Image (spheres, rainbow, N blue to C red):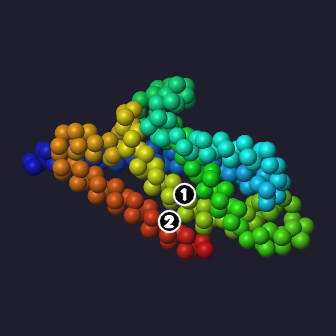
């Protein structure tokens, strides 16, 4: 491999790495913010929640399960009109954030709900006995006690989105996975496959290590 070829590959991969980080960061941030809403509603309206409302819980739970079951590639195509409406185009790195976010919302919503509902019932009862309102119990007990578990869920979300971002290349999203497919697989460039695979492995391991460290500190 010549110097020019190496320089070209470095530039292509660095651009793709930035695209991956850009897509994963924004889709993670948006999905966590939006996903908190159904997660809290599910927690509050669950049979063992602070305000049990079975119909609301059952309907919302069903919708979350339905959207979670959509394969990302199919969702990618189905939301093209919505993506064009939101960002003005259906192709590109920014456009890919829309389907990535939509696929992640039900995933993280279920994870956050599970984390919140694992809060010790004894702590909740103690808060009630001290006269805490439902709002205070939600923020000072449910959410505060669940932060380490929610963090673990966000780490899983980030790792999943790294994999999904590779498929986003089908709508011109770019990213490391897209480079591995277009250059490594389709053009039989083993060097691209190896480098892209190593970068993704290092990235995932780094995210997992940071997540584990924060979990221990917060616990």
Q: How far apart are marks 2 and 1 (CA)?
A: 9 Å
x and y percentages locating residue 95 in the rendered image: 46, 33
Residue at the spot 84% in from the left edge and 73% down from the top edge: 126
In which image quadrant can residue 56 be found? top right
Q: Can residue 68 be seen in this view?
A: yes
**Residue under circle 1?**
154
Left or right: 166, with 38 as reference point: left
**Residue under circle 2?**
211
Does label 2 or label 1 sit earlier along the sequence? Answer: 1
Residue at the spot 79% in from the left edge and 60% down from the top edge: 48
In which image quadrant can residue 167 be found? top left
Q: Which of 83 and 59 is in front in this view?
A: 59
Task: Look at the numbered discs 2 and 1 and tell me whether their residues touch, using CB distance below 8 Å.
Answer: yes
Q: How crowded is mark 2: few (under 14 residues within 10 Å), some or many (20 or more)?
A: some
x and y percentages locating residue 97 in the rendered image: 48, 39
Q: Residues within 10 Å of mark 1 (few under 14, many from 20)?
A: many
Q: Is residue 44 visible?
A: no
Residue at the spot 55% in from the left edge and 25% down from the top edge: 85
Q: Which of 50 and 9 is in front in this view?
A: 50
Residue at the spot 76% in from the left edge and 54% down from the top edge: 46
Helix, strand or loop at label 2? It is: helix
Helix, strand or loop at label 1? It is: helix
x and y percentages locating residue 164 in the rendered image: 43, 45
């Amino acid at each position: 491999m010549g110097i020019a070829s190496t320089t070209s590959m470095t530039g292509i991969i660095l651009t793709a790495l930035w695209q991956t980080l850009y897509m994963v960061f924004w889709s993670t941030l948006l999905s966590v913010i939006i996903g908190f809403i159904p997660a809290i509603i599910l927690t509050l309206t669950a049979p063992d929640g602070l305000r049990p409302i079975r119909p609301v819980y059952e309907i919302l739970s069903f919708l979350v399960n339905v959207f979670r079951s959509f394969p990302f590639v199919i969702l990618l195509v189905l939301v093209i009109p919505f993506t064009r409406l939101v960002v003005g185009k259906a192709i590109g790195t920014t456009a890919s954030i829309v389907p990535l976010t939509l696929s992640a919302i039900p995933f993280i919503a279920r994870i956050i709900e599970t984390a919140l509902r694992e809060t010790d019932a004894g702590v909740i009862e103690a808060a009630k006995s001290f006269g805490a309102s439902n709002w205070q119990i939600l923020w000072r007990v449910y959410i505060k006690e669940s932060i380490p578990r929610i963090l673990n869920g966000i780490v899983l979300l980030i790792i999943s989105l790294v994999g999904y971002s590779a498929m986003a290349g089908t709508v011109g999203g770019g990213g490391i996975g897209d480079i591995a497919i277009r250059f490594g697989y389709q053009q039989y460039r083993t060097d691209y496959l190896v480098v892209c695979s190593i970068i993704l492995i290092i990235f995932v391991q780094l995210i997992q290590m940071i997540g584990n460290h924060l979990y221990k500190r917060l616990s």
